[in-house]
Image: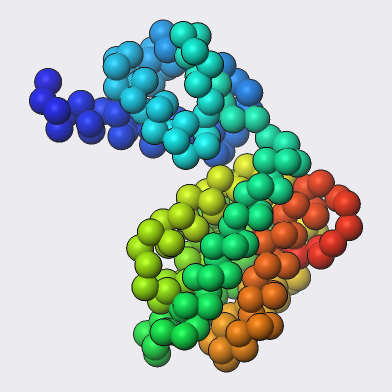
Amino acid sequence: MTTADADTLTERAAQRIEADILNGALAPDSRLGITQTAARYGVGATPLREALSRLAARGLVNAIGKRGFRVQSVSREDLADIVRVRTLLEREALRLSMAAGDGAWEGEIVAALHQLRRYVAHNPRGFGEGEPAFNDLHKRFHASLIAACGSPRLIAACSTLYDEAYRYRRLMMATFTGYEEFVREHEILAELTIGRSRERAEAQLAAHIASTLARVYPCGGADRAS
């Protein structure tokens, strides 16, 4: 097997395991023994270990010595940390995007919002994290806000943190009884961003991100959809 073939196997295994973690097929704290997990995903032990190591670097699994790996747990402390770091990075990315964004950037925000709004209006039963089409549109909108920041690393870091919050967003979305409030939150974000209302846009984004924590672990604060 060539190095390229091994890397392809590793990446495929990582993608499949990541998908199962994010969609709940692999529950938080589930043990990922090498032998059992290799059999489950039809991959050898070596590429599997590399795949799990990559996921550990992304905070989705934890190494437990010679016993293999375990799916990352969920907790208020973990979500609070994600929210804290995501807020810091996305506020900066949003600030840079508002300073540098052009008409094409504004157009992508409008298009992403339209697609998201149209989907939830026509698919009320599919509204929420867990539906692949909704997930893609929701992430596309958030990515569009910061796409003009000029930093590929910043964009990648924000994408990773967005994905790490996925399991928590699934819990949050279950608290909504309709899509109108959700859509309005995103409309406000788009309007403030395109209008270059810097302070208001950054504050709205921060509250928007923090709402996942407020809804999943109620302790006061804004009650919005991130």
User: In the visual, does 67 lie left or right of 7?
Assistant: right
Question: At 88% from the left edge and 52% from the top edge, which residue is drawn?
Answer: 219
The picture places residue 108, in percent across and down from the top left corner, at: 43, 78
The quadrant in which residue 220 appears is: bottom right
Rendered position, 161 above or below 106: above
In the depicted view, which residue is nearer to us: 118 or 102? 102
How many marks the image carries: the answer is 0
User: In the visual, does 97 lie left or right of 225?
Assistant: left
The picture places residue 88, in percent across and down from the top left corner, at: 59, 62
User: In the visual, does 157 lie left or right of 209?
Assistant: left
- On the question of residue 19 being in view, the answer is no
The quadrant in which residue 116 appears is: bottom right
In the depicted view, which residue is nearer to us: 154 or 144? 154
Please, which residue is most extreme toward the right here? 220
Question: At 54% from the left edge and 62% from the top edge, which residue is drawn?
Answer: 89
The picture places residue 167, in percent across and down from the top left corner, at: 63, 42
- On the question of residue 80 being in view, the answer is yes
Question: At 73% from the left edge and 36% from the top edge, which residue is drawn?
Answer: 75
In the depicted view, which residue is nearer to us: 88 or 200? 88
User: In the visual, does 64 lie left or right of 220?
Assistant: left
Question: At 42% from the left edge and 84% from the top edge, which residue is drawn?
Answer: 101
Q: How is the image coloured?
A: rainbow
Please identify the quadrant where the C terminus is shown: bottom right
In the depicted view, which residue is nearer to us: 161 or 22? 161
The picture places residue 43, in percent across and down from the top left corner, at: 31, 18
Please identify the quadrant where the N terminus is shown: top left
Rendered position, 76 above or below 45: below
